[in-house]
Amino acid sequence: MEVKKVEVTWLDACSHDDVVSVTSHELQPITMVTVGWLMLEDEEKLVIARDLLVGEECGNRVLVVPKAVVQSIAVLIRANGDHHITGKVVAKSERPELVISQ
């Protein structure tokens, strides 16, 4: 299985346990950035593992992100074999039709 290391920017729900006004500016979704191994992508979701088991087709610390909340996906690439990682945004949309296959 070929997996790509990705950086995904997505919107998450935000919860407040204190009393807040309905008109409060605090009542907004929050932007999250997740870096991990793209284990699965389909029309509805991305499945990202934070850790990849070498030689196995599995990972752990898995997160499922609905494509409807994904803002951008960048495939991370090692530059010239060193440990510097550069990102390339291959999909950016406010819609769930994100595809990163290249």
Image (cartoon, rainbow, N blue to C red):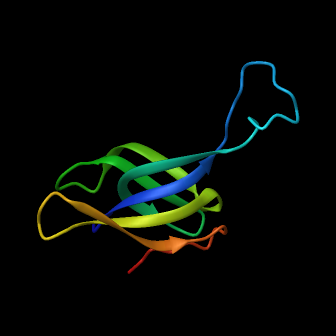
Is 21 situated above or below 42? above
Residue appearing at x 61%, y 73% in the figure: 97
Q: Residue furthest top?
A: 18
State left or right for residue 58 relative to residue 44.
left
Q: Tell which residue pokes out farthest to the left in this image.
A: 81
Kindly give the residue lying farthest to the right in the view shown.
22
Residue 63 location in percent, x, y?
47, 46
For the residue pair 16 and 65, the one nearer the viewer reads as: 16
Q: Residue at x 63, y 68 (%)?
A: 96
Residue at 44% in and 49% down? 34
**In the depicted structure, whether residue 17 falls above or below residue 5:** above
Vertical side of 15 occupied by 66: above or below? below
The C terminus - image quarter? bottom left
3 sits left or right of 64 in the view: left
Q: Position of residue 65 (x, y in %)?
A: 55, 53
Q: Is residue 39 above or below residue 77?
A: above
> Residue 54: x and y, percent?
18, 52
Q: Quadrant of residue 84?
A: bottom left
Q: Residue at x 27, y 67 (%)?
A: 1
Question: How many badges with numbers are in the image?
Answer: 0
Counting from the top left corner in percent of width and height, residue 61 is at: 38, 40
